[in-house]
Image (spheres, helix red, strand yellow):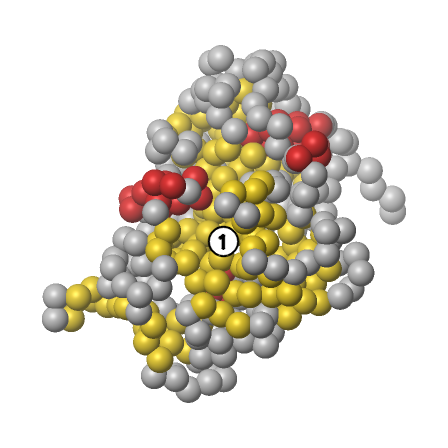
C-alpha cells in the first residue's frame, strides 16, 4: 500500500549489471524488468488474442495496420533473465518485461524482451524519435536509429506463439567507452522513461561480488507501544483495528527501500515506510512471499511487533519514516538474488482503500544486506 498501505501496483526490479563478452557481444546492463498486469485473453478461431491496453499512444496515432511476424525469439533455457521469471509469472496475474543493453557490430542495442501472453497481441508500441540514451555525465543524448523488426513510430500488432519470448531491438549509436551513467527514454511499455542505469565496464569493479558465506545476527528493533488492541477485528470497520505508537524510526530514505538479515532460523526483511499524516493505517505480511530463481517459495511467517495480514493504525508525525519488518522462512546462503511478491489483497472499506499487488524482482541479496545500516533507530528531532 503506497502512502496508506504501501502496496503499489508497479513493481520495481533490481538490475543485474555487469560487463561481459560473448560472441563479440558486450553486455552493458540487463534487468528482469518491471512486472505488469497480464492483459485479458480471448479465443478467436482457436488463437488466443490479447489487447495491450498499456500502450500510451492511443490518443496520438492511429493504428498503422502493421502486424509483425517471425520476431526473433530467445531460448528461455539459455538466458537467466527468463528461465525463472517467465515460469514464475505463470502463477501470478503479472508478467515481466525484461531488457538487456549490449554493444554489438559497432552499435548500442537495447533488447526489449516480450513474453507473449497470447498468440496475437494488438495495440503494441515500441519506440519513436523519443527513444534515446542520455549520458548523464556529458549531457549528450544518443538517439534511436531504427528498430528490428521495423516498427519504429508505429502502433502495431504481433503474431507469435503464446509463451515464447520475443526479442525486439532498438539500435543506437555506440556509446563512448567512458560512459558509465545513463538514462534510457522513450520505451514506455518497458517503463524506460528516464530510467537511470549504471554501466559497469570494468570487471574488477562489478557491483555484485557473489554471495556472502556467513549468517547475520537477528536484528533488534525499537518496539512500538500498543495503544489499542484489536477487538472483534473487521477489515471493513477501522474502529476494530489495533493501534500503535512510538514506531522504530529511521532516517528518511526512499519509501519502499528494503534491507535483509539472513539467519539459520529465519530471513528478516525491513521495509521503509513513510508517514504522511499523524495517524495512518497499514497492512503487511499475509501471503507475501520470496521466490528464488529455481522457483522455490519462502513464505512470510510473521511481522515483528505488528499484526500479520490484518490492517492496523500507526500514530506518528507527518515526515516520519519507520521500519516494518517481515519474517520469512530462512534463505540458503548461496542465493545471489531474490524476488519479493505481495499478492493483491481483499477490498476493504476505508478512505482511499487500496490493496494492490507488488512485485520486486531480481533483488540483489548482497545489496539488501548492505542496506542494514539504513535501518538504525533514529529518534525524531523536531524544531518548533
Nearest the eye: 282 or 86: 86
For residue 197, side relative to residue 356 (left or right) = right
> Percent x, y for residue 369?
62, 27
Asked which secondary structure carries label 1, the reply is strand
Image x and y of residue 105, in percent? 56, 58
Question: Closest to the observer: 199 or 314?
Answer: 199
Where 221 sits versus 148, above or below? above
Counting from the top left corner in percent of width and height, residue 204 is at: 70, 32
**Residue at screen point 75% across, 31% down:** 378
Q: Is residue 181 above or below residue 204?
A: below
For this orientation, the residue located farthest to the bottom is 62
Position of 124 with respect to 34 (left or right) is: left
Mark 1 packing: few (<14 Cα in 10 Å), some, or many (20+)?
A: many
Q: Nearer the viewer, residue 66 or 63?
A: 66
Q: Is residue 85 visible?
A: no
What residue is shown with label 1?
Answer: 99
Amino acid at each position: 500500500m503506497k502512502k496508506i498501505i504501501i502496496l503499489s501496483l508497479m513493481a520495481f526490479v533490481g538490475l543485474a549489471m555487469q560487463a561481459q563478452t560473448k560472441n563479440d557481444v558486450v553486455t552493458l546492463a540487463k534487468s528482469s524488468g518491471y512486472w505488469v498486469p497480464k492483459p485479458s485473453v480471448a479465443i478467436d478461431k482457436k488463437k488466443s488474442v490479447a489487447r495491450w491496453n498499456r500502450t500510451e499512444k492511443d490518443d496520438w496515432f492511429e493504428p498503422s495496420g502493421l502486424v509483425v511476424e517471425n520476431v526473433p525469439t530467445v531460448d528461455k533455457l539459455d538466458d537467466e533473465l527468463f528461465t525463472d521469471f517467465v515460469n514464475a509469472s505463470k502463477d501470478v496475474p503479472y508478467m515481466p518485461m525484461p531488457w538487456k543493453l549490449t554493444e554489438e557490430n559497432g552499435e548500442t542495442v537495447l533488447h526489449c524482451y516480450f513474453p507473449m501472453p497470447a498468440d496475437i497481441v494488438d495495440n503494441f508500441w515500441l519506440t519513436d524519435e523519443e527513444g534515446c540514451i542520455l549520458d548523464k555525465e556529458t549531457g549528450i543524448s544518443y538517439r534511436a536509429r531504427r528498430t528490428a523488426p521495423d516498427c519504429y513510430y508505429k502502433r502495431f500488432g504481433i503474431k507469435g506463439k503464446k509463451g515464447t519470448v520475443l526479442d525486439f531491438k532498438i539500435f543506437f549509436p555506440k556509446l563512448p567507452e567512458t560512459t558509465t551513467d545513463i538514462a534510457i527514454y522513450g520505451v514506455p511499455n518497458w517503463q524506460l522513461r528516464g530510467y537511470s542505469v549504471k554501466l559497469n565496464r570494468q570487471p574488477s569493479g562489478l557491483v555484485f561480488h557473489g554471495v556472502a558465506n556467513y549468517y547475520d545476527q537477528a536484528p533488534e528493533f525499537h518496539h512500538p507501544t500498543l495503544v489499542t488492541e484489536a477487538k472483534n477485528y473487521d477489515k471493513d470497520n477501522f474502529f476494530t483495528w489495533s493501534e500503535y505508537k512510538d514506531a522504530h524510526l529511521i532516517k528518511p530514505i526512499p519509501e519502499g527501500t528494503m534491507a535483509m538479515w539472513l539467519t539459520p532460523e529465519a530471513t528478516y526483511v525491513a521495509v521503509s515506510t513513510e508517514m504522511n499524516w499523524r495517524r495512518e493505517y497499514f497492512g503487511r505480511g499475509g501471503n507475501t512471499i520470496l521466490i528464488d530463481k529455481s522457483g522455490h517459495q519462502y513464505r512470510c511467517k510473521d511481522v515483528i511487533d505488528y499484526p500479520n495480514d490484518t490492517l492496523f493504525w500507526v500514530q506518528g508525525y507527518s515526515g516520519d519514516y519507520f521500519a516494518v519488518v517481515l519474517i520469512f522462512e530462512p534463505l540458503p546462503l548461496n542465493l545471489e538474488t531474490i524476488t519479493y511478491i505481495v499478492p493483491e489483497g481483499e477490498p476493504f472499506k476505508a478512505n482511499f482503500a487500496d490493496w494492490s499487488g507488488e512485485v520486486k524482482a531480481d533483488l540483489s541479496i548482497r545489496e539488501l544486506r548492505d542496506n542494514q545500516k539504513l535501518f538504525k533507530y533514529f529518534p525524531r528531532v523536531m524544531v518548533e
